[in-house]
Structures are given as structure tokens and as C-alpha cells.
Image (tube, rainbow, N blue to C red):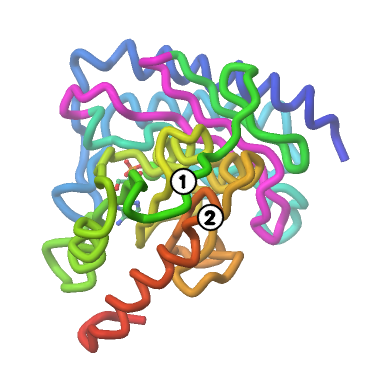
Amino acid sequence: MFNLDATLQTIIAIARDAGHILLHHFDNPTITATKSTDSDIVTIADKEAEELIVAALKQQFPDHHMVGEEGGGTGAPAETAEYFWFVDPIDGTVNYAGGMPFFSTSIALTDKNRQPILGVIYDPWRDEMFSAIQGKGAFLNGQSLKVSKTASLAKALLSSGFPYNKHLQPDNNLAEWAAFLVQVRDLRRLGSAALDLCYVAAARMDGYWEQQLNPWDVLAGILIVREAGGMVTDYEGGANPQQEHKGKYVASNGHLHAAMLEVIQAVRSSRSDFAT
Ligand code: 2AM
Ligand code: CA
């Protein structure tokens, strides 16, 4: 195994460089394409930042496979590589393209079974660098992170998000949102899954759920939440939601996890028009 502490410093430097690109284009964020729907957009900064990150990773880790949100797979072949990097150059692209200063760059190292080993999420606007190495805790700008102690939904601040194809299917998280809204202190829709997870780790929020997320949205954040003492599962409580291409995720401080699963499962079992 290579030196993870040294690797973390390398990835932090790469994430900072990507952050400079995002801030450079922030005042003039040209949308270059839409993907699955009109909500699913790509900007020049997405492309430039991913190219910078993937080029740096390929140079440092030629034996690893890299998966980027905008570019597919590259580096060593996925069939033979022992280690994988999942790169999201801008998580929160809709915020970014609208001039909302809430987005992040997410970079995760996993083994070949998609178990996260190292994760970095950088919010360049606030200069907040979230990081974790498996078994070594989670940090924000070098300070140790610990999840909140909130133990009841009535006192909880939760966040969530809605899939890009929300206009096209009833299983779009509106029913879950409505069920939570009347049971919690409040809900937030912040727009960056990676930062939602970091905010659970940092005790700024108590929990988060969302469906139809790709591995690059969440792999770094899963590790950061778990290393801060929190829990991340699928909607049934299973520990490996990242195995799905469009996974369903519940993250919490641990104390709220069973209650969150119960709300979600009650909604979903009442809806025969939802996919499983
Ligand atoms: P993005 O900004 O990188 O596209 C918003 O709810 C969060 O969910 C963002 O992190 C966004 O990632 C992600 N997201 C929303 N809909 C998605 C979808 N259908 N597939 C993948 N990610 C999605
Ligand atoms: Ca993303």
C-alpha cells in the first residue's frame, strides 16, 4: 500500500488547484451542454477542472483507474486496476451555473470493491477543505470533525435533493420530502450532495437523504461522514449503497438513522407507482 498521508496532501493540493479554476470562471460560467435533462448541465469549468484533476492523478498514479463525472473512465484498465479514483469536478453545478456560491470538488480513492479509502471535498468559496482517510478520522481544514448528538427528528435539521429527471417520474423524492417536512425542525435543499455529506460530518446538519446519486457524488462524503462518527446506508439500511450506479443514500449522525429509515420506508411502501 502506498503512503496515504502523503497521498492526502497531494490530493488536497490538486483540489485547491481545481478550486482556482472554479472561482476563475464563477462570474461567467458558460454552460456548454445539457446531459440527461435540461437541469443536468455542464460548464467550461467542469471540463477544465476535471481535466486538471485527472491529468494530475494519472501522472501520480499510473496504475490506478480514474472515473470522472464528465469524462468516463481513464488511466489503467478497470479490469486490472487495484485502486480507483472517482472525481466530481463541480458537485452542485446548477448552483455554480446560477452564480450561487455553494458547490464543491469531490475526489475519492477506493479499492476495486468501491470501498472508500481516502476522500477530499473542497469548497473553494469558503476555503473549506474536508478530508478523511479510512480509520484516521475526518477533518475540516485540519480540525477534527464529529457528527451532532441530536437524537430526535423534532430537533433535527436535515437536507435532501431531487433528481434531474424529477419532471419525468413520480418517484422523485417529493413524497419523502413532504413526510419529513412536518416531522423535523427544518429541511434544506442545498444542491451539492458532497457538501450535504460534509455538513452532516461537521454537525452543521443532523442528516441527509437523496436518491439517484452517482458514485462520484458521494464516495468521498461517505468516508467523511463515517470517519466523523456518522452512518451512511441505502434506504433499507444496507451498508453498500455506492455499488448502485444511481444509488439511494441516507446519512445521519447515527442517533437519527433508524427514524430516518422508518420515514422513508413508510412513504415508499405506500407507493405502488415507485420503482424499488
Ligand atoms: P452535480 O451537481 O454534480 O450534477 C443535487 O441534489 C445533488 O445531486 C448534486 O450533488 C448533483 O450533482 C446531484 N444529482 C442530482 N440529480 C442527479 C442525477 N440524476 N444523477 C446524478 N447526480 C445527480
Ligand atoms: Ca455531482
Q: Earlier in the sequence, mark 2 or mark 1?
A: 1
Q: Is residue 70 visible?
A: no
Relative to 158, residue 145 above or below: above
Q: Give percent across and percent down for residue 97.
A: 20, 29
Nearer-the-camera pick, 45 or 235: 235
Displayed quadrant of residue 94: top left
Amino acid residing under circle 1: Thr
Is 121 covered by the magenta stretch? yes
Residue at (44% x, 60% y) in the render: 249
Whether tag 2 and tag 1 are in contact, CB under 8 A, the answer is yes
What residue does disc 2 label? 255
Q: Is residue 115 above or below residue 237?
A: above
Disc 2 residue lies near ligand 1 with CB under 8 A: no
Specify few, some or many for label 2: CA neighbours under 10 Å numbering under 14, 14-19, or 20 or more. Answer: some
Determine whether, in the image, residue 116 is placed left or right of residue 42: right
**Residue 105 pos. (x, y %):** 45, 30
Figure quadrant of the N terminus = top right
Residue 35 in sight in this render: yes
- First to last magenta residue range: 97-126
In what element is the residue under mark 1? loop
Q: Which residue is labeled 1 in the image?
A: 150
What amino acid does circle 2 point to? His
Q: Nearer the viewer, residue 6 or 46?
A: 6
